[in-house]
Amino acid sequence: MTGTTLIAGIGNIFLGDDGFGVAVAQRLAEVPLPDGVRVVDYGIRGMHLAHDLAGGVGTAILVDAAPRGEAPGTVYVIEPELGPAAAPGGGPEAAGDRELPAGPLLDAHGMQPDLVLGMLQVLEGERPDRILVVGCEPASTDYGMTLSEPVAAAVDEAVKVVLGLVGAPDSGAGGTCTASTSTGSTAGGSAPPGQVTEG
């Protein structure tokens, strides 16, 4: 496994706040990143992302809209639980005959992070040692190419969070998270737009 870090912007820019991950990736592409860190705007190319994640990335940070019932603009840091990986050359059987998550693999969004992670269970190759999701509570994912006001305001905060995660200097992200070791619940209740909640 390599020590590289992949920052992946995910989302459909034609569905309002679903374009959050793309906006963050575009902003990160304009700032210096530490050696071994690269940022890619995957948009709705979920299959491409899944294959890249299985190609020897050390750490993956997925940035996407993440509806979890909090105030729009709330930024989350989530470390999802991953099942055992398939043995090299073993295919789905080596991973315990797991199937991909139920639901459409290709929709207007492209592929949500949970489906991308599900595909890693059956793809051959090395999967990342660590996967994090930096998500933002959307206000609307209706058709449109503009982020809502609270989500647009959260882009800068998410950039700071990602820079802090990769150890970029002067990221300004320290001390803004409400820490939690759980992988599914939000810590500390509702957070106002722009506040970072780690779940």
Image: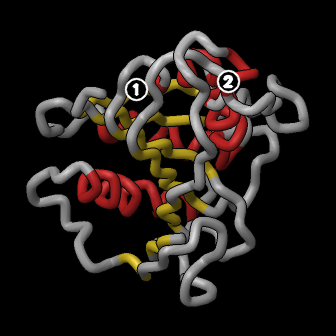
Amino acid type at image mark 2: Ala
Where residue 175 appears, as percent x and y from the top left, is 27, 79
Q: Earlier in the sequence, mark 1 or mark 2?
A: 1
Q: Which mark is residue 40?
A: 1
Label 2 near label 1: C-beta < 8 Å? no
Residue appearing at x 44%, y 55% in the figure: 155
Looking at the image, can residue 108 be seen? no
Q: Please, which residue is most extreme toward the right here?
A: 103
| Residue 70 sits above or below residue 62 on the image | below
Residue appearing at x 63%, y 24% in the figure: 46
- Local packing at callout 2 (Cα closer than 10 Å; few below 14, some 14-19, many 20+) is some
Amino acid type at image mark 1: Val
Residue 173 as seen in the image, left or right of residue 18: left
Q: Secondary structure at mark 2?
A: helix
Q: Please, which residue is most extreme toward the bottom here?
A: 188
User: Splitting the image into 4 quarters, where does residue 196 fall?
Assistant: bottom left
Residue appearing at x 51%, y 65% in the figure: 75
Residue appearing at x 48%, y 71% in the figure: 198
| Residue 181 sits above or below residue 187 on the image | above
- Local packing at callout 1 (Cα closer than 10 Å; few below 14, some 14-19, many 20+) is some
Counting the numbered discs, the total is 2
The Cα atoms of the two marked residues, 1 and 2, are separated by: 30 Å
Q: Which of the two discs, 1 and 2, sits closer to the camera?
A: 2
Looking at the image, can residue 160 be seen? yes
Where residue 171 appears, as percent x and y from the top left, is 18, 59
Residue 75 as seen in the image, left or right of residue 161: right
- Residue under label 2, please give it: 94
Where residue 84 appears, as percent x and y from the top left, is 59, 40
Q: Assign the C terminus to one quadrant of the image.
A: bottom right
Q: Secondary structure at mark 1?
A: strand
